[in-house]
């Protein structure tokens, strides 16, 4: 029987919210005050037939931001929608897909729903979550259609170098496979971000959205960057879902792209002090936690030194109105994902509560 649900996503919708939300994996949401727009910026219906495959000014804005032509941009409903659309166009039931471990569970759920045979390659804590390239080479046997990874990595926040991702691409190309990189956290590196992974070769696809780095989840603006041939295939697959996308969402997203430098400055003003707080907290609690600490991220993935399961820690934290994501949702029960892209005062209090819970005080 195929998987027909995401266990993590259901948990996140029903249990992640808390007064001090350290389970959050994206930037605290923008308000209308953060996004300046005028009534003329908003369209209710598509202005012409050219918008059937997405509002042209939005595709042009995404293309300009990431250095591709508009013909290589496919619009989707957030990054998860982009991943699902790409998988739907590329994967047939029974196809083998090679996926990093640990990874973001909805990726596995989507592939399972489509009937893929999922194989794994390790990204080990002890190796700083750098991939095992020899294991990838061995597992890219004939029949693997697609390699899937997140970069920056979800849940650890680790950013692989372009050289490392290019090596994965070289191994995949030799086996006749494509590589899909979920790069939704890429923009949190701002001017230090590497180019979009789509530039690593024609067998690469990249997915992203305005959600994680910019706090615009409600717009559901996601996209796939791919070769023109693959982009056209994905648009035809998207025809199964309707004639047009949401014009209000796409026109407001176009407005957001015009203001991206200001939105990025807002993101940085929220993230930078919180990164310093989390790094200091992890150093202070080295007796209880060990962690691969990226230079920049909005999540980290600590491992408990003295407990085998983070679920009891999560339960103690809930008594303190604080949430984290138990590691079981990333196939690593001793770990937990800690998010810190919310208000600094909430991160400060949430970390204080986490310290208490680590000491067994609730």
Image (cartoon, rainbow, N blue to C red):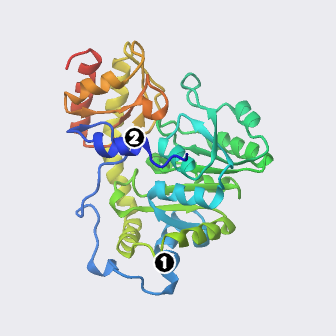
Q: CA distance from mark 1 to mark 2?
A: 36 Å
Q: Earlier in the sequence, mark 1 or mark 2?
A: 1
Residue under circle 1? 243
Q: Is residue 351 left or right of residue 166?
A: left
Q: Residues within 10 Å of mark 1 (few under 14, many from 20)?
A: few
Secondary element at tag 2: loop
Q: Is residue 104 above or below residue 240?
A: above
Q: Is residue 205 above or below residue 162?
A: below
Residue under circle 2? 298
State whether residue 328 appears in this view. Answer: yes
In the rendered image, which quarter is residue 210 located in? bottom left
Q: Is residue 357 above or below residue 91?
A: above
**Residue 305, how many percent across, how many down?**
42, 14
In the rendered image, which quarter is residue 358 located in? top left
User: In percent of the image, x 44 and y 45: which residue is there?
Assistant: 6
**Residue 111, how many percent across, how many down?**
57, 49
Q: Is residue 222 left or right of residue 194?
A: left
Q: Are the residues at dot 1 and dot 2 in contact (C-beta closer than 8 Å)?
A: no
Q: Nearer the viewer, residue 330 or 35?
A: 330
Image quadrant holding the C terminus, namely top left
User: In percent of the image, x 50 and y 79: which residue is there?
Assistant: 52
**Residue 101, how many percent across, how many down?**
57, 34
Q: Nearer the viewer, residue 160 or 266?
A: 160
User: In percent of the image, x 59 and y 38: which residue is there?
Assistant: 100
Secondary element at tag 1: loop
């Amino acid at each position: 029987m195929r998987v027909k649900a995401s266990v993590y996503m259901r948990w996140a919708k029903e249990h992640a919210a808390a007064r001090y939300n350290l389970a959050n994996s994206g930037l605290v949401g923008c308000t209308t005050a953060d996004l300046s727009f005028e009534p003329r910026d908003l369209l209710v219906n598509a202005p012409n037939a050219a918008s059937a495959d997405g509002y042209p000014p939005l595709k042009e804005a995404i293309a300009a931001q990431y250095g591709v032509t508009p013909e290589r941009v496919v619009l989707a409903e957030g990054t998860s929608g982009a991943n699902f659309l790409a998988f739907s166009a590329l994967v047939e039931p029974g196809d083998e897909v090679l996926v990093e471990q640990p990874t973001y569970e909805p990726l596995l759920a989507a592939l399972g729903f489509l009937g893929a045979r999922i194989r794994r390659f390790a990204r080990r804590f002890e190796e700083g979550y750098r991939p095992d390239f020899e294991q990838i080479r061995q597992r890219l046997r004939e029949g693997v259609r697609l390699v899937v990874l997140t970069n920056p990595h979800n849940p650890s926040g680790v950013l692989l170098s372009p050289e490392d991702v290019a090596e994965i691409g070289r191994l995949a190309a030799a086996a006749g496979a494509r590589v899909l990189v979920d790069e939704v956290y890429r923009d949190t590196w701002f001017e230090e971000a590497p180019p979009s992974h789509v530039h690593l070769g024609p067998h690469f696809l990249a997915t992203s959205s305005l959600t994680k780095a910019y706090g615009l989840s409600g717009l559901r603006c996601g996209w796939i960057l791919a070769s023109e041939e693959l982009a056209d295939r994905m648009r035809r697959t998207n025809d199964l879902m309707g004639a047009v996308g949401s014009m209000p969402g796409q026109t407001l997203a176009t407005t957001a792209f015009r203001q991206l430098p200001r939105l990025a400055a807002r993101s940085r003003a929220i993230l930078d002090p919180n990164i310093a707080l989390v790094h200091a907290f992890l150093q202070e609690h080295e007796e209880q936690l060990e962690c691969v600490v990226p230079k920049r991220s909005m999540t980290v993935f600590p491992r408990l030194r003295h407990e085998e399961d983070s679920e009891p820690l999560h339960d103690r934290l809930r008594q303190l109105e604080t949430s984290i994501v138990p590691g079981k949702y990333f196939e690593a029960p001793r770990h937990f994902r800690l998010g810190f892209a919310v208000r600094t005062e909430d991160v400060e209090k949430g970390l204080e509560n986490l310290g208490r819970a680590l000491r067994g005080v609730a």
